[in-house]
Amino acid sequence: MDENQIYITDDTGVEHAFKILLTYENDGSQYVLVEDPNDSDQAYLFRVGEDHTIEIVEDEEQLEIAEEIFSTAFGDEE
């Protein structure tokens, strides 16, 4: 198992490997930013629960925080 990947099972039971771009903690929650395995221009943000379950984050404020952290860590490519 590659430590730079996370495996997520979708609603149909199919497992997908995502490249981990960044992990961080904010307001007591753990987040992981991953790259779409089929489109390197697409990324997803997940919140990791205490029981290790994950949920996709769609909250604009949290997405902006992730973007700021990513830009600080890797530089702004825009």
Image (tube, helix red, strand yellow):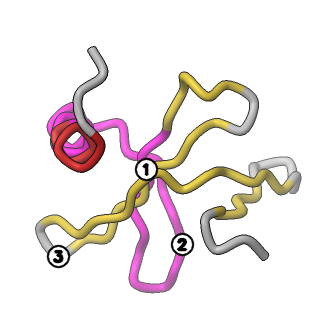
Quarter location, residue 37: top right
Magenta stretch: includes residue 18: no
Quarter location, residue 53: bottom right
Residue at image point 57% right, 40% down:
35
Of the numbered discs 3 and 2, the one sitting upstream in the chain is: 3
Q: Residue 28 shows which numbered tag?
A: 3
Nearest the viewer among 37 and 9 is: 37
Nearest the viewer among 38 and 49 is: 38
Of the numbered discs 3 and 1, the one sitting upstream in the chain is: 3
Disc 2 crowd, CA 10 A, few/some/many (<14, 14-19, 20+): few
Magenta-drawn segment: 44-67
Front disc: 2 or 1: 1
Q: Is residue 2 above or below residue 62?
A: below
Q: Is residue 11 above or below residue 31?
A: above
Quarter occupied by the C terminus: top left
Q: Describe residue 39's horizontal placement relative to residue 53 as left or right.
A: right
Q: Is residue 1 above or below residue 73?
A: below
Dot 1: what SS? strand
Residue at image point 52% right, 48% down:
34
Q: Describe residue 53's horizontal placement relative to residue 60 as left or right.
A: right
Circle 2: residue type:
Thr
Residue at image point 72% right, 63% down:
7
The residue labelled by disc 1 is 33
